[in-house]
Each structure stands twice: as structure tokens, then as C-alpha cells.
Image (cartoon, coloured by chain):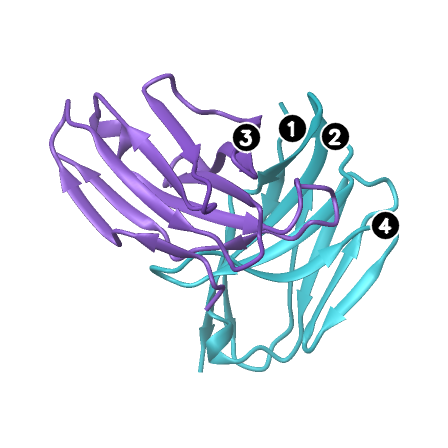
Amino acid sequence: DSGVTQTPKHLITATGQRVTLRCSPRSGDLSVYWYQQSLDQGLQFLIQYYNGEERAKGNILERFSAQQFPDLHSELNLSSLELGDSALYFCASSVGQGASTDTQYFGPGTRLTVL
Amino acid sequence: GQQLNQSPQSMFIQEGEDVSMNCTSSSIFNTWLWYKQDPGEGPVLLIALYKAGELTSNGRLTAQFGITRKDSFLNISASIPSDVGIYFCAGQYFRGGSEKLVFGKGTKLTVNP
């Protein structure tokens, strides 16, 4: 158990819908990262928040957005869902801002299926 | 962007055999990480490497940070059935004012008892 929690574990929805994925980081960690894992693209970094502020952006679509709240939990919002958005979405957390020695610990993931 | 080439894609071995997998890139990384992912779970960090040339062990696992900073390998000795899973390498680099992590496509390991 990494100490990172994600809800829900599974989500099934239809195209065009909007969903929210939730992540609680390990106690004491200030950074939250979101990743998408699909069969063809592998693990792709989406976005990082540090202490409530956006810190780094990766391959995140404009239809996706995220935020980190004062209690440090984070939500990833996915809207206008398409079939290709079906994937595992992982949250990871780390103590610092993401320095090269800052280890990321991954949650169990949310499996999103878009029908 | 930075890309990692991880090989092999999959391995089928007998229990007790040693395993070797590697990641290469045309880009330089500050940190190399090796993760293992079990079905339905998130990646779990196995080994982190922070200096070029560094050789680090974690039980039966040994990993090295290539001297050119463009590659890394992971060895597993005397494999056991619970080593089954997907192993990912990841490289960390600095770009646009922040550190970023890029993952290899993974090596799927099957161990036959």
C-alpha cells in the first residue's frame, strides 16, 4: 500500500459525458501527479500540482482539467468523453516539487471505460 | 519530447533463471527509476538511480545508471513466481522549469514454476 488513495476504482460512462476522478496523496506529500495509462500509449504524464498550484503540464487534453484543494487532495475532470479516453488513470504523490530525488508513489488507479 | 526504448517487450523464463532488461534513449536523464506493476495495481518503485554510473541493489534486483546518462538496465537474479508482472523504466529530466518523468513501454515478465 503506497498510501495514495484513488476513487472510484472503476468508472463506466458514455461518450460525451463528464467524470471526476479523486486522489488523496500520502500524508505529508505536497505534490500530486496525474498519469494516463493506455495499451497503445503506455504511461503518459498529464499534469502536476504542488501545494495547490499547477507545477508542470504534460500531454493533457484541453477537455481535461485538474485542481488541488487546500487539503491537498486532487481531482481530475474529464469532459466530452470519447471512446479513446478509456484508460487507467493513476495519481502519484511526492514530498517536494518534483526534484530529481523526489520519489513519486502511485495510487491503485481508476479504470475508466467509455462506451 | 524525450522517449525511452525499453526491451525486451516480454520475457518467458523458468523459475530460478536470471533476467535482464534495459532502457535506452537518445536523450540525457537526471534520474532513472525502475517500477513494477501488478495487474490492476499502480506502479511500485523498485530502484531509483541518481548518478551516472551508479549501481544499486535491492535484494535480488540490481540496476545501473548508464555512464552516458542515456540508458539503464535492471537485472533480476534467481527469479521466482512472484516476480511476474510488468516492469517499467522511467527517466526524469528537467524541462520548462520543472522536472518531468517519462516511462518506457514496459517489459512483461512471465515466470514458469
State the residue at coordinates (53%, 50%). Answer: A93
Cα distance, mark 4 to mark 1?
19 Å
Q: Camera-side residue: B4 or A27?
A: A27
Where residue A14 sits in the image (x, y, percent)? 11, 31
**Which image quadrant is residue B101 in?**
top right
> What residue is disc 4 on?
B51
| Residue B67 relative to residue A55: left or right | right
Q: Residue B2 has which mark?
A: 1
CB contact under 8 Å: marks 1 and 3: no
Chain letter behind tag 3: A
Where residue B106 sits in the image (x, y, percent)? 52, 49
Q: Is residue A73 visible?
A: yes
Chain letter behind tag 2: B
> What residue is disc 2 on?
B27
Where residue A39 sits in the image (x, y, percent)? 36, 41
Cα distance, mark 1 to mark 2?
6 Å
What colour is chain A? purple
* Amino acid on which the number 2 mark rests in the picture: Ser
Q: Nearer the viewer, mark 2 or mark 3?
A: 3
